[in-house]
Image (tube, rainbow, N blue to C red):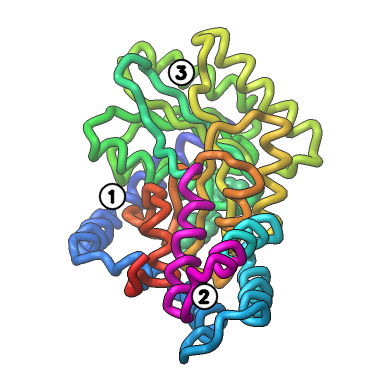
Amino acid sequence: MGIFSFLKKQKADRKAAEQSADEVKGAEQAQNQPEPELDQKLKRTRSRFTDNLLGFLRGKKPVDEELLEELEAQLIMADVGVAATQRVITSLEEKAKKDKLQDSDAVRAALRSELISVLKPVEQPLEIPDTITPFVILVVGVNGAGKTTTIGKLAKQLQDGGKSVMLAAGDTFRAAAIEQLQTWGERNDVPVVAQDIGSDSASVIFDALQSAKARDIDVLIADTAGRLHTQSGLMDELRKVKRVLSKLDEQAPHETLIVLDGGTGQNALSQAETFNEAMALDGLVITKLDGTAKGGVVFAIAEKTGLPIRFIGVGEQVADLEVFEAERFVDALIGNEVEA
Ligand SMILES: Nc1nc2c(ncn2[C@@H]2O[C@H](COP(=O)(O)OP(=O)(O)OP(=O)(O)O)[C@@H](O)[C@H]2O)c(=O)[nH]1
Ligand SMILES: [Mg+2]
């Protein structure tokens, strides 16, 4: 597509966006309705935890080796992963030895506190210091993980927090990717720096940083095309983005954020590990936790990578991005009705 037809298309898209302004307004009104609680949004994973994992604890069973073995099997089946499961079970065994697990309520309470302790070290919210402007966030991950959607949601949150935000359309592979980011930008009145499809991703993001500096923008968020860590050419492209940005600001990008689709279970874990080796990640966002029963993978990712989980995605709407909190997450899965 030539630049002229591209611009024409952009114009047509803008018009379409204006026409749908009423729809957006309606959606915003809907967003003003009280939000469903996190446990509702995580209901599939919650039901795996409460029905399968905790179901067998109901009724006063003796706390013996067999019960802990069953619990271990259930944790593995809930995608918690071997390492995190072992840590939890070992600690429960120690408590059992000291006669601290008298009944299944005590097991539940101990389980709750062990699960929290797996997640606590990675509860490190994204902090954007006022002293760094523009603060540059580079968003990476495999195809379809939720990168662009997360950027849209994050832009709104930051804006609501009083930051000025700019987006960079660094996914130059598909016209639809550029348009998708522009739609999010229009919806929130956030400027989007884009170039023609097929242009060099690093140059788009470099231009955006220059522009953000000139306009005194607080936060620049750069989108990138989905890729697998095995696609070495594409991984080189990401390294080039980093290199080029550091010419304008030695510390940029200040946050390299990977977006992982929680519904892919153990694949999400291996993506976090391999991208981290290639890119030195600063943080994670785990999306689509609303649509999956595999939310237990959050524990596996926390235990194995130790990388900060900045946010979780729990739906497709702009408000469906939550700052990750260990206790809140565990309570949404297993409840906190028992005394810890
Ligand atoms: N249910 C649910 N859907 C989500 C969430 N986050 C993103 N999605 C959906 O996942 C699909 C892919 O999201 P994108 O943001 O386009 O993913 P991407 O990583 O940018 O994809 P590529 O640009 O193709 O690599 C879209 O339909 C989103 O609406 C979430 O937290 N929950
Ligand atoms: Mg995208």
Residue ID at (64%, 61%): 90
Residue 102 counted in the magenta span: yes
Query: In the rendered picture of this protein, how many numbered marks are placed on residues?
Result: 3
**Mark 1–mark 2 distance (CA, rounded to whole Å):** 44 Å
Comes first in the chain, label 2 or label 3: 2
The residue tagged 2 is: 49
Comes first in the chain, label 3 or label 1: 1
Q: Nearer the viewer, mark 3 or mark 1?
A: 3
Task: Tell me the crowding category of disc 1: few under 14, some 14 to 19, or many 20 or more residues within 10 angstroms, Cα based.
Answer: some
Q: Are marks 2 and 3 in contact (CB under 8 Å)?
A: no
Amino acid type assigned to the residue bearing label 3 in the image? Leu
Q: Residue furthest bottom?
A: 59
Task: Tell me the crowding category of disc 2: few under 14, some 14 to 19, or many 20 or more residues within 10 angstroms, Cα based.
Answer: many
**Mark 3–mark 1 distance (CA, rounded to whole Å):** 28 Å
Comes first in the chain, label 1 or label 2: 1
Name the disc covering residue 209, or none.
3
Residue ID at (22%, 63%): 26
Residue 212 left/right relative to 203: left
Residue 108 counted in the magenta span: yes
In the rendered image, the quadrant that contains the N terminus is top right
Residue ID at (28%, 49%): 18
Name the disc covering residue 18, or none.
1
Q: Determine the image quadrant of residue 2.
A: top right
Q: In this picture, is 327 found above or below 39? A: above
Report whether the residue tagged 1 is closer than 8 Å to ligand 1.
Answer: no
Q: Determine the image quadrant of residue 293.
A: bottom right
Q: Position of residue 77 (x, y in %)?
A: 66, 73
Any part of residue 42 in sight: no
Dot 2 falls on a residue whose secondary structure is helix
Magenta span: 93-122
Amino acid type assigned to the residue bearing label 1 in the image? Glu
Residue 81 left/right relative to 136: right
